[in-house]
Image (cartoon, rainbow, N blue to C red):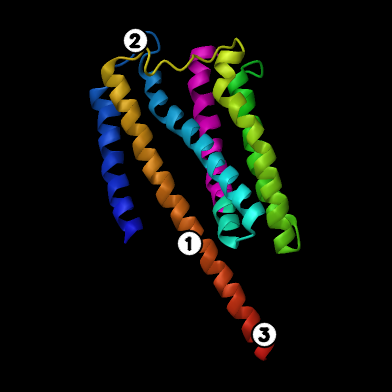
Amino acid sequence: MKRLILWGLGLVLMFLALYLVFLYAPIEKVMGIVQKNFYLMVPMGWLSLLSYFVIFIGSIFYLTKRDRKWDDLAYSAAEVGIIFTSLALMVGSIWARPIWGVWWAWEEPRLTTTLVLWFIYLACLLVRSLTVEEGRGATFAAVVGVIGFIDIPFVILSTSLWRGMHPPLIIFEEGGLDPRMRLTLMLSIVAYTVLYVVILMQRVAIRRDEAEVKKLKGLVSQES
């Protein structure tokens, strides 16, 4: 029931966000229509960070409590997170091509640190899935999830720590974004965050169902 309500809320927010993006928010004078990509790029970047926060919390609790539900949460967040991180990188490249003249710039700190984050997501999934013994795999993945968190501050502060082409965050600065742009961006972030929560809840539920089916198969095998 909760997921159904969230699905409905997410659908309404998504339609409202699309209306604001294409019919309400003004076109930026310098970048033109390409700037509309901003309302997708920022939410994708936010969700790539949010998902790793979930992994970090789930990993810590799994290592301390050894409760499978925290492993389910961390692993599901890694699966969802790598998708949104991939989208953030792809959308960012699509935006960079007409603005910077290149699809990718290795000297750009935000892009490079986000790519490192993508590889950390991949490491979490590979360690968890390639380890034969399930408990050991969960432990290894949790350790990677905790250690990998070191990249998050670098992603967040990359535009402040290093001089690059990526524009700094000016959402709330005076004279930064047009108020209509700010409203559109904030609503887009909320809409995609609701979508993320729904997808994550669904993936956790599926993973628990898979564990239950595996357990039942084991009981059937023992009886036969």
Residue 221 has which mark?
A: 3
Instruction: State the image coordinates of residue 69 (x, y, percent, origin top left).
Output: 55, 60
Q: Which amino acid does label 3 sit on?
A: Ser
Q: Quadrant of the N terminus?
A: bottom left
Q: Is mark 1 on a helix, strand or loop?
A: helix
Residue segment shown in magenta:
76-101
Residue drawn at x 54%, y 53% as measured from the top left: 73
Near mark 2 (Cα within 10 A), the count class, few <14, some 14-19 or many ≥20, is few
78 falls in the magenta region: yes
Instruction: State the image coordinates of residue 157 (x, y, percent, origin top left).
Output: 56, 20
Residue drawn at x 57%, y 45% as measured from the top left: 57
Residue farthest to the bottom? 224
Q: What element carries label 3?
A: helix
37 falls in the magenta region: no
Residue 174 has which mark?
A: 2
Residue 205 has which mark?
A: 1
Relative height, residue 188 to residue 25 (above, below): below
In terms of depth relative to the viewer, which is nearer, 57 or 117?
57
Give the CA distance from mark 1 to mark 3: 24 Å
Lateral position of residue 43 relative to residue 221, left or right: left
Of label 1 and label 3, which has the lower sequence position? Answer: 1
Q: Is mark 2 on a helix, strand or loop?
A: loop
Residue drawn at x 73%, y 51% as measured from the top left: 140
Near mark 1 (Cα within 10 A), the count class, few <14, some 14-19 or many ≥20, is some
Q: Which amino acid does label 1 sit on?
A: Ala
Relative height, residue 198 to residue 36 (above, below): below
